[in-house]
Image: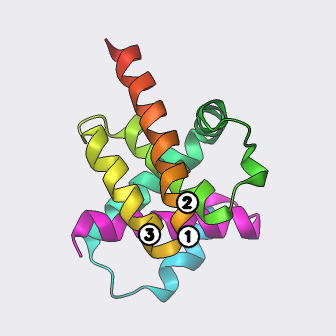
Amino acid sequence: MGTRRKSRELALQMLFQADMGKQQPEEVRNTFWRERTDVGREVQGFAEDLFRVATDRSADIDRLIEGHAENWRMERMAAVDRNILRASVAELLGFPGTPRAVVINEALEIARKFSGPESVQFINGVLDSIGRELEQAKA
């Protein structure tokens, strides 16, 4: 597994912990890394960056997701799916140098690993729609 994929998975786990445990970002950082002493500095750095963007811009990110997830409110989505979307949208917003196709493909691979088959299509549709909107806004 590549460095970036591992970082994305760790960012997802951090977001999931914050979401399900109703924890503040600093609390998550303190407990999350305590048990992961074998993670390299580069992997941890990108995971932290994704987590920071996702938490700092959470209201905008959630609004974007809900706007593109037809008939789905955030609280109705599966927790894993919701947080895969959050991490991916954070990457689209915070790291515009990463191609949209790469962000989406990585999200789908992570969804295949951590979520159900029906989630892959849902995540693909939402991220593709958000990605197109963000690219149009840049143009």
> Which dot marks residue 116?
1
Whether residue 44 is visible, yes or no, is: no
Residue receiving disc 3 = 112
Judge from the rendering whether residue 92 lies leftward or rightward of residue 123; answer left or right: left
Q: Mark 1: which amino acid?
A: Gly
Tell me the residue that label 2 is attached to.
119
Which numbered disc, 2 or 3, marks the residue that appears first in the sequence? 3
Are discs 2 and 1 less than 8 Å apart at CB?
yes
Q: Quadrant of residue 139?
A: top left
Residue 124 in the image: state x and y as whole percent: 45, 47
Distance of mark 2 from mark 1, alpha carbons? 5 Å
Residue found 53% across the figure and 70% down from its top: 13
Measured along the vertical axis of the image, is residue 114 above or below residue 76? below
Crowdedness of circle 1 by 10 Å Cα count: few (<14), some, many (20+)? few
Q: What separation in Å lies between label 2 and label 3 (alpha carbons)?
A: 8 Å
Please give the name of the residue rendered at 57% of the width and 42% of the height, measured from the top-left corner. 56
- Residue 29's tag is none
Residue 67 image point, x, y percent: 64, 30
